[in-house]
Amino acid sequence: MVKVTVDPLTRIEGHMRVSAEVDSKGYISSAQSAGMLFRGFERMLQGKDPRDASLHVARICGVCPISHSMTATNALDDLYGVAESIPANALAVRNFIQAANMIASHATHIYILFGPDLANPRYRDVLTSSTLGLGATGQAVWGELVGRFAPISYKIDGKAVPVGSSYINAIPEKKRLQEAIALFGGKMPHQAVTRAGGVTCTPTDAEITKAAAIYLKVMDFVNTYTLGVPVDQWVANTSKAKSPEAAVKFVADHLANLVSKTKNNDFSRANGWKDVELFAAFGSELIGEKILGLPASLRLDKIGGYTDPSKISFLSYGAYYKSGQDGYTPESKAGERFLTSGVVSGNLKYEELDPSKITESIQCAFYNDDVASRHPYDGTTVPVEDPALINYEGPVTSKYSWLKAPRYNGIPAEVGPLARLIVAQDPLIIGLAQAFAGAGMSPANVYTRMLARMHETAILANEIVNWLGSIDTANRKFATSLDFNAAKDGQGMGLWEAPRGALGHWVSGDGSGKIKNYQAIVPSTWNLGPRDENGIPSPVEQALIGNAISGIDNVLGADYTNPVAIMHVGRSYDPCIACAIHTIDATGKNAPKEYEL
Ligand code: NFE
């Protein structure tokens, strides 16, 4: 057995560590995922005025600050009892800035955080190896991968290939989207307009026009780089298809058509091979074998899946308020949001969301409590005090992470774009999930996670203009008033979706109008937490097991120094550990030795 540790795993910021036990044939037999940073927003919020929570929590993260402030705002709308009377105009503004942030975050992940892995030298070695004999086709695909996704300049046949075009051109799009958010939010990150009761801005027609113009620019990028089918056509034929079968057939036919008209290994954009199509070429059962003659074991849909459907589910709290109507229900009942809430089992059975079934376990996390698991309304955040107990290398039954372990009805849940669209029964994603399950494969894998992120970008891009257009500037009602007494002994729950998945905040009043308890369970905690008191591994810990350490089936032998599988599988969840721990102790008193401030 060889132990392979990747630390840090994330490109977004550090402090996520994955340690895997690899057997003598080069396959992962056990994995531990650890968050290594101790932060502390939940404790900091105690004793504060609840109305300020939406401002404080935005600082949990600079990538998804809209989602944190929005989720806090939802919890506060609930605490003050005003959720059902928030004006439609305020809900439209909230939808717009959330969707713009979601698209920016997805572009960051696809192109900056995950994309560079596709230009890993391992792909060069595999695609150009004589063992596989892909010849000129393999060379051409490698050239396209580097030309689009490489974060550095490579040399091919002695000639320098510039930094990847998709990688470099995605960056200004994020800036553009930040500007669109700032038009309403005042600034970005950490906008200040989503507050309990509504929003604090009153947009003008000129601002809406400007936001629409920025959006159109971003759509140029999506149409030029990401999708080989215009956004509206893609959505009409996939997300709005008559049936899952029709949606999958549309994509399969589109790809088959592309393959049939591709001659001389021309996988260029000009020939219709946009990023989603190129990604499919070696990522999917739909096409992988057809164009490259790849063995099935080389495909991305073969890695990062689950083997035991009874130990995993897919969870979404639902997101985006229904357009054109005042108010929403805080518990996000099924069918009440643009993307619906719910829980889908590992066997793809849907059930309605019951927020009382959510718990967090500290069994394997560096926190003390009398009981292993609690509902977040009763949750505590008490870090272990003895630095000697901070051991990321401990056995799987010990404490080994700063992330707690969230569970739904006692079962780990994957969250994120894939889970969101499985729960929403999106025809393309549910069609693919069913097809994979029918073929005895896991419905969740590296390919479906990445495809869902691209597909959700198209769905939101198609909808965002409607939300923008629904803002009625002649009607100046953007907020409702609050009864401050309502917060004294009350409780509030915010259930929302961040780019990386289900995000929940729970707040309770202390009887005097201050916050008594505040708990946040974030997407990366769901996906990347440790084991629980029943020894069940988290989603990523399950998804790593059984994979060849060098990815793509160790086809050229196991390379322990380039563990592509750990990178692909871990990064397919788009990890953000700053979000997942959200606790900082400025005295350093409770921090592990190596992190003392
Ligand atoms: Ni720091 Fe976040 C998102 C939240 S992390 S990015 O998306 O909440 O899981």
Image: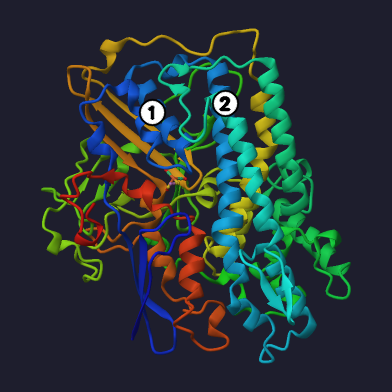
Q: In this view, does 428 lie above or below 220?
A: below
Residue 252, given in percent of the width and then of the height, sits at: 75, 61
Task: Identify the image quadrant of the N terminus.
Answer: bottom left
User: Tag on residue 43?
Assistant: none
Evaluate whether residue 338 shows in this view. no
Res 397 quadrant in image: bottom left
Out of 181 and 527, give the one closest to the viewer.
Answer: 181
Q: Where is 1 relative to 232, above or below?
A: below
Lateral position of residue 399 relative to residue 206, left or right? left
| Three-letter code, disc 1 | Leu
Q: Position of residue 92 (x, y in %)?
A: 58, 23
Query: Which of the 4 quarters of the picture holds residue 540?
Result: bottom left
Answer yes or no: is residue 406 visible.
Answer: yes
Front one among 219 and 547: 219
Give the side of residue 523 with respect to residue 184, left or right. Answer: left
Which label's residue is closer to the chain start, 1 or 2? 1
**Which residue corresponds to the image point at 55% horizontal and 64% vertical from the top-left?**
446
Q: Is residue 258 above or below residue 213?
A: below
Left or right: where does residue 591 sit relative to residue 266?
A: left
Label number found at residue 55: 1
Asked if the residue under mark 2 is in contact with the one under mark 1, i.e. CB atoms within 8 Å, the reply is no
Element at badge 1? helix
Of the four image quadrants, the one with ligand 1 is: top left
Does label 2 point to a residue whose CB lies under 8 Å from ligand 1?
A: no
What residue would you read off at disc 2?
Answer: 322
Q: Residue flagged by tag 2: what amino acid is it?
A: Lys
For the point 46% across and 14% down, the residue is 85
